[in-house]
């Protein structure tokens, strides 16, 4: 039996490894596959503690910096919570991609350059037509199963008719993510989240000499101008050389009517996403990859829909709640409240850490 994975980002590669370990013959198609140094993308690059066992069971061990907890900060105060059951890991996106790609190759996953364009399925399998065939890759690929792992703006989701409109309120509150690295030694082992009136600035150590900064906020956010408004960050980054290009992604909020249709299962951001505010996209995607392949193996693709809802339930509830508060009049009260209610803050962080 064959599985075709569309999209070779971290979740596509994790899904490919899962499928290979389950005994399928696996092909990944990814337009940026030949990019030197590994595919880069805007990401806060924090692997929550719960993501690490999921990577370990795939045999993937990326190098990174330990993350011991989360610190919410505003101009005048901060509140810290240390993870109670083990550390997370700050991992440069290209390092994670390379570790996953090497493991996939070691297991015999075939990766091809190409961009999925049209998808048609019948009772016995799925045909995927590629846009602008490269000459290296056939024009049409056929497989028993397809895992759509092509990110927020998924072509697979659109092609199988699962795109759904986002309501007007969500559209008005569209949020984007931006990130850049700086040649500065990390100054904390906590993920710092600086709450300003307009953005959240995430600080993640990714190597002994490089620190990543990710901003979440409205479209058109001016990255450097926002950092300059956070005195703690402005001082730390004073004179520091950029260590990567500025990248952006979004809008975050995307939805699928359901996560599968017939022999095509959506996994990772392609299956619907709320926001990066809880720093959970990777853990969640690895978990989705695990249950997607388990259902394909068992021949119960519809079982994926209920498993997907189960593994994403906490994320959806917590993230929707936090985004509503972040977009509303209580925004400036988040850090003071977290400081006044450390046990509530701690239990929220522990939920993210799982
Ligand atoms: C600013 C920011 C900060 C974040 N911080 C964190 C964090 O700290 N921790 C965390 O866990 N998560 C974080 N996230 C979320 C996390 O980055 C995503 O959840 C994760 O990248 C999802 O991976 P994916 O493989 O599903 O999608 P992607 O990483 O988007 O990969 C999709 C892949 O599909 C390919 N593709 C696209 N179209 C096609 C096509 N038609 N055919 C074939 N291939 C295609 C793309 O080239 C790409 O390689 C953050 C996100 C942002 C934007």
Image (cartoon, grey):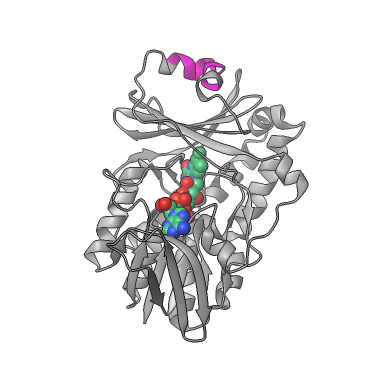
Looking at the image, which is closer to me, 255 or 314? 255
**Which stretch appears magenta?**
226-235
Q: Is residue 348 left or right of residue 294?
A: right
Rendering quarter of residue 18: bottom left
Q: Residue at x 70, y 46 (%)?
A: 321
Looking at the image, which is closer to me, 266 or 315? 266
Q: Can residue 84 be seen in this view?
A: no
Q: Is residue 183 visible?
A: yes
Q: Which residue is drawn at 68% across and 36% down?
A: 326
Q: Say if 301 sits above or below 123 in the image.
A: above
Rendering quarter of residue 23: bottom left
- Image position, residue 210 (x, y; %): 33, 29
- Image position, residue 141 (x, y; %): 38, 72
Q: Is the magenta stretch mostly helix, strand or loop?
A: helix
Magenta stretch: includes residue 8: no
Looking at the image, which is closer to me, 157 or 227? 157
Task: Point out the residue furthest to the bottom here.
Answer: 123
- Image position, residue 181 (x, y; %): 39, 29
Quarter of the rendering occupied by the N terminus:
bottom left
Magenta stretch: includes residue 228: yes
Looking at the image, which is closer to me, 84 or 99? 99
Q: Say if 322 sits above or below 50 in the image.
A: above
Please give the count of numbered marks on the rendered protein: 0
Q: In this view, does 345 lie to the left or right of 189?
A: right
Task: Point out the residue furthest to the left here.
Answer: 106
- Image position, residue 270 (x, y; %): 53, 58
């Amino acid at each position: 039996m064959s599985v075709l994975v569309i999209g070779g980002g971290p979740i596509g590669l994790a899904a490919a490894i899962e499928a290979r370990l389950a005994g399928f013959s696996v092909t990944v198609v990814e337009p940026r596959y030949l990019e030197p140094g590994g595919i880069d993308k805007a990401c806060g690059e924090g692997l929550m503690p719960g993501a690490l066992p999921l990577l370990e069971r795939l045999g993937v061990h990326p190098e990174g910096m330990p993350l011991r907890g989360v610190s919410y900060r505003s101009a005048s105060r901060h509140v810290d919570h240390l993870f109670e059951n083990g550390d997370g890991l700050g991992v440069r996106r290209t390092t994670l991609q390379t570790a996953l790609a090497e493991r996939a190759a070691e297991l015999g996953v075939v990766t091809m350059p190409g961009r999925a364009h049209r998808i048609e399925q019948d009772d016995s399998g799925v045909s995927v037509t590629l846009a602008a065939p490269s000459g290296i890759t056939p024009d049409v690929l056929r497989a028993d199963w397809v895992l759509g792992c092509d990110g927020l703006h998924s072509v697979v989701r659109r092609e199988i008719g699962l795109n759904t409109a986002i309501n007007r309120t969500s559209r008005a509150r569209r949020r984007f993510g931006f990130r850049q690295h700086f040649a500065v030694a990390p100054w904390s082992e906590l993920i710092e989240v600086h709450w300003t009136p307009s953005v959240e600035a995430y600080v993640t150590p990714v190597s002994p000499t490089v620190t990543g900064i990710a901003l979440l906020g409205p479209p058109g956010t001016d990255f450097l101008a926002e950092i300059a408004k956070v005195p703690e960050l402005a001082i730390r980054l004073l004179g520091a050389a950029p260590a990567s290009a500025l990248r952006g992604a979004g809008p975050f909020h995307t939805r699928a009517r359901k996560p599968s249709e017939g022999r095509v299962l959506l996994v990772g951001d392609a299956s619907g996403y709320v926001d990066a505010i809880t720093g959970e996209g990777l853990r969640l995607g690895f978990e989705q990859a695990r249950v997607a392949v388990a259902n394909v193996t068992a021949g119960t693709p519809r079982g994926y829909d209920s498993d997907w809802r189960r593994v994403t339930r906490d994320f959806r509830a917590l993230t929707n709640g936090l985004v509503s508060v972040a977009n509303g009049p209580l925004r400036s009260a988040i850090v003071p409240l977290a400081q006044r209610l450390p046990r509530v803050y701690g239990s929220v962080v522990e939920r993210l850490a799982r």
